Image (cartoon, helix red, strand yellow):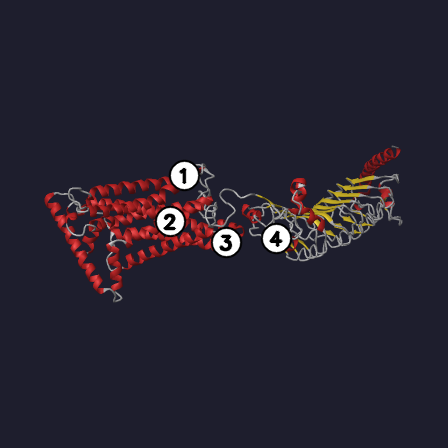
């Protein structure tokens, strides 16, 4: 108790004497005038002016703190006008344990051996000395009991000598923070024997690199933790941690850190936790991963790829930036290193799971599981682009390649035949070209998705960010929305044009002209282009899912965008159905029409309506439910719709509207004839076309003469399916104009 009272008394006395000396300094300064310095270093300050030190190294303290008890245990040197701390300034205080040097606004330098030879000193805090610039060599030397050393809030501190920290055998905590140092301090001569040493360098914004061998020799045991937080570090050089045993390393909030040399950890061991959160790293140091048990890389936006998974031998916990990276660890299977034979024998016991579940999970369970955050969400399941939870992924991959090739080749052939034929461009041909181009864009989208799936198969987690956030996914999404809307618009226009031609086909003054069709299709192109462009401008997004569809409905604007597109597609489907029903009723007259002709018309229209139904209705239904945040299926199931139903029109349209029609076959034969092939077949086809034309003209004349329905007479003569084919393509007007 007496000892404790003595220590308290010593602290109080030291603080009182500091107040007294501040008053003396102020009086002396006033009396001495401008020619008197305020340095309380080796040139000691007295009331009569400056006098040279007589050689006693403790005289600085005696004059600064007269009558200071020799058993002082805590000393606070604060709010003084000292400019430097001389060698062995406090060596006379043999019982000193805690030393605080704070708020000395004129202190610029700590001389060599300034804090040396204080046998019981265990804590030094140097803080808020705003003009401190230099800490000299051996400033902290021969301090056998020093455990805690803090240097902080000294913005002008630029240089710490590489021999400043020497032989601090019991050091457990060293912090250098909020300073202006530009060179990483050298800790290699500390030689601490502590088993729980913590090194901390924080908020040193001018510190731009960690050089080689800067940590080697800092501790004879293992460093418990090294915190390099919120510095200006840009690079960790090769060999920076060589020969160092370290448990935890934190490089958090070094926002300019872009590179850790692959050899930075060579020769080091025992690193169990690495934190590189809020850095600009694009790759992890592979040499540090073998013993790592915890990896923290939160908000490391440039860290888009992981190293080979077999390097993570001991990893247990991972807190990462992107959910896709956690997918890498979901099914990771690792073999355990060789264990003690006794542990192996215990693991073989069948009752070990029930008797010691924690022991079994820690030492016996295989594969070793990794706890990883953030987990994948419903929009980004842990699977490849063309993977599916209900269907063999290879079936899905084969299907998308087949569908994409059909869409590409079929629509490309339609464009080549239609635009390269000898006949002039008419309204039906013009609309057919627009439809083929839209469906060709859908084929391009499917090909992009299929190619990316092959390229990233088995490692999509490493490509997810570059793909979904990059230009590739935006381009693919643009192609699919543009293709979908242009195809829907063109199909609707083709249907309306057919309906108008059938009902008004023999009244030439009411026929649709090519210039009218061009004007209307320009509006369709503008609508499709705008619809595809909006997700790239922030209205919804193509980057939400791996298949690059605009499925982001987080905002009200995105929801409205998606719902409007889907409702318009449904309305277009209803319009197509209504028009074809009207066409069928117009060409059907039970008293005069042969059954075979009716069947041709009915089959054609049934195919058109059925393919449109499969393409639009299921996708619109599920998409609207998802847009209203009540999804009936997930992204994994949506891929089936993407491959099987979504592009069905793009594959079928070339057959329905081109390959199976007489006009397209005639154009194909005319192109082939240019190469000297099929001349006889071309001639026969032309004669058949002339006969069909005569049928149409007779129907037109009789219609004008008797006022009969324009669709009734042609069925009574000629091939019973001719009028059905002409109805499907709007060929009545084309025959009149082209022949």
Circle 2 sits in a helix, a strand or a loop, which is it? loop
Query: Which of the 4 image quarters holds residue 558?
Result: top left
Cα separation between marks 2 and 3: 23 Å
Q: Which numbered disc flags the more N-terminal residue, 2 or 4?
A: 4
Q: Which numbered disc flags the more N-terminal residue, 2 or 3?
A: 3
Circle 4 sits in a helix, a strand or a loop, which is it? loop
Q: Which numbered disc flags the more N-terminal residue, 3 or 4?
A: 4
User: For the point 34% across and 40% down, which residue is it?
Assistant: 570
- Label pair 2/1, CB-CB below 8 angstroms: no
Cα separation between marks 3 and 1: 30 Å
Q: Which numbered disc flags the more N-terminal residue, 4 or 1?
A: 4
Q: Nearer the viewer, mark 4 or mark 1?
A: 1
Cα separation between marks 3 and 4: 22 Å
Indicate the position of residue 248 as horizontal and vertical percent values. Answer: 69, 47
The quadrant of the rendering that contains the C terminus is bottom left
Indicate the position of residue 712 as horizontal and vertical percent values. Answer: 16, 45
Left or right side of 127 for 698: left
The quadrant of the rendering that contains the N terminus is top right
Q: In the rendered image, which residue does mark 3 sit on?
A: 457
Q: In the rendered image, which residue does mark 1 sit on?
A: 624
Q: Which numbered disc flags the more N-terminal residue, 3 or 1?
A: 3
Q: In the rendered image, which residue does mark 4 sit on?
A: 284
Of residues 605 and 178, the one nearer the viewer is 605
Q: Nearer the viewer, mark 2 or mark 1?
A: 2
Q: Nearer the viewer, mark 3 or mark 4?
A: 3
Indicate the position of residue 579 as horizontal and vertical percent values. Answer: 26, 42
Q: In the rendered image, which residue does mark 2 sit on?
A: 647
* Picture mark count: 4
Q: Can residue 283 be seen in this snapshot? A: no
Q: Is residue 384 above or below residue 582?
A: below
């Amino acid at each position: 108790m007496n000892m404790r009272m003595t220590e308290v008394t010593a602290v109080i006395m030291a603080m009182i004497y500091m107040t007294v000396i501040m008053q003396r300094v102020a009086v002396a300064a006033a009396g001495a005038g401008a020619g008197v310095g305020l340095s309380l270093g080796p040139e000691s300050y007295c009331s009569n002016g400056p006098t040279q030190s007589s050689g006693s190294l403790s005289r600085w303290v005696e004059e600064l703190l007269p009558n200071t008890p020799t058993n002082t245990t805590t000393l606070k040197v604060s709010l003084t006008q000292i400019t430097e701390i001389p060698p062995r300034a406090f060596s006379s205080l043999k019982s000193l344990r805690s030393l605080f040097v704070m708020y000395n606004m004129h202190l610029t330098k700590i001389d060599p051996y300034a804090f040396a030879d204080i046998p019981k000193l265990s804590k030094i805090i140097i803080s808020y000395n705003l003009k401190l610039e230099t800490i000299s060599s051996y400033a902290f030397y021969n301090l056998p009991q020093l455990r805690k050393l803090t240097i902080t809030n000294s913005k002008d501190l630029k240089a710490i000598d590489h021999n400043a920290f020497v032989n601090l055998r019991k050091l457990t905590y060293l912090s250098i923070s909020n300073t202006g140092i530009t060179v990483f301090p050298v800790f290699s001569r500390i030689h601490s024997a502590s088993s729980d040493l913590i090194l901390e360098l924080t908020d040193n914004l001018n510190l731009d690199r960690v050089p080689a061998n800067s940590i080697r020799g800092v501790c004879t045991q293992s460093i418990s933790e090294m915190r390099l937080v919120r510095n200006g570090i840009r690079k960790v050089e090769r060999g920076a941690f060589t020969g160092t045993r370290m448990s935890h390393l934190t490089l958090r909030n070094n926002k300019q850190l872009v590179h850790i040399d692959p050899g930075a950890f060579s020769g080091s061991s025992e690193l169990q936790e690495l934190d590189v959160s809020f850095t600009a790293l694009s790759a992890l140091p592979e040499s540090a991963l073998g013993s790592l048990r915890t990896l923290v890389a939160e908000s490391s936006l440039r860290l888009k790829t992981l190293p080979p998974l077999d390097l993570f031998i001991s990893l247990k916990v991972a807190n990462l930036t992107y959910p896709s990276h956690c997918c890498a660890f979901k099914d990771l299977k690792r073999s355990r290193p060789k264990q003690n034979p006794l542990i192996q024998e215990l693991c073989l016991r069948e009752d070990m799971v029930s008797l010691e579940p924690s022991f079994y999970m820690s030492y016996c369970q295989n594969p070793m599981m990794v706890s990883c955050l953030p987990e994948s969400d419903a929009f980004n399941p842990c699977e490849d682009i063309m993977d599916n939870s209900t269907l063999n992924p290879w079936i899905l991959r084969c299907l998308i390649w087949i569908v994409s090739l059909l869409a590409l080749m079929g629509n490309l052939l339609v464009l080549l035949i239609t635009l390269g034929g000898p006949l002039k461009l008419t309204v039906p041909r013009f609309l057919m070209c627009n439809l083929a181009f839209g469906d060709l864009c859908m084929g391009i989208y499917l090909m992009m998705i299929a190619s990316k799936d092959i390229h990233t198969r088995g490692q999509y987690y490493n490509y997810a960010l570059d793909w979904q956030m990059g230009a590739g996914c935006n381009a693919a999404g643009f192609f699919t929305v543009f293709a979908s809307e242009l195809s829907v618009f063109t199909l609707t226009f083709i249907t309306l044009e057919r309906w108008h031609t059938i009902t008004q086909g023999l009244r030439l003054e009411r026929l649709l002209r090519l210039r009218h069709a061009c004007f209307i299709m320009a509006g369709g192109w503008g609508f499709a282009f705008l619809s595809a462009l909006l997700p790239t401008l922030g209205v919804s997004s193509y980057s939400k899912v791996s298949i690059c569809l605009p499925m982001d409905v987080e905002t009200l604007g995105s929801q409205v965008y998606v719902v409007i597109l889907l409702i318009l597609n449904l309305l277009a489907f209803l319009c197509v159905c209504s028009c074809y029903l009207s066409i069928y009723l117009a060409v059907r007259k039970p008293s005069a029409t042969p059954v075979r002709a009716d069947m041709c018309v009915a089959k054609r229209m049934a195919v058109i309506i059925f393919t449109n139904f499969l393409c639009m209705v299921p996708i619109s239904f599920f998409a609207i439910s998802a847009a209203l945040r009540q999804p009936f299926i997930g992204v994994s199931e949506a891929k089936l719709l993407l491959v099987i139903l979504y592009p069905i029109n793009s594959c079928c349209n070339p057959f329905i509207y081109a390959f199976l029609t007489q006009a397209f076959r005639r154009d194909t034969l005319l192109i082939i004839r240019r190469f000297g092939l099929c001349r006889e077949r071309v001639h026969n086809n032309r004669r058949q076309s002339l006969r069909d034309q005569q049928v149409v003209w007779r129907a037109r004349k009789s219609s004008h003469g008797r006022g009969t329905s324009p669709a009734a007479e042609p069925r009574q003569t000629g091939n019973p399916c001719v009028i059905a084919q002409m109805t499907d393509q709007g060929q009545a007007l084309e025959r009149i104009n082209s022949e």
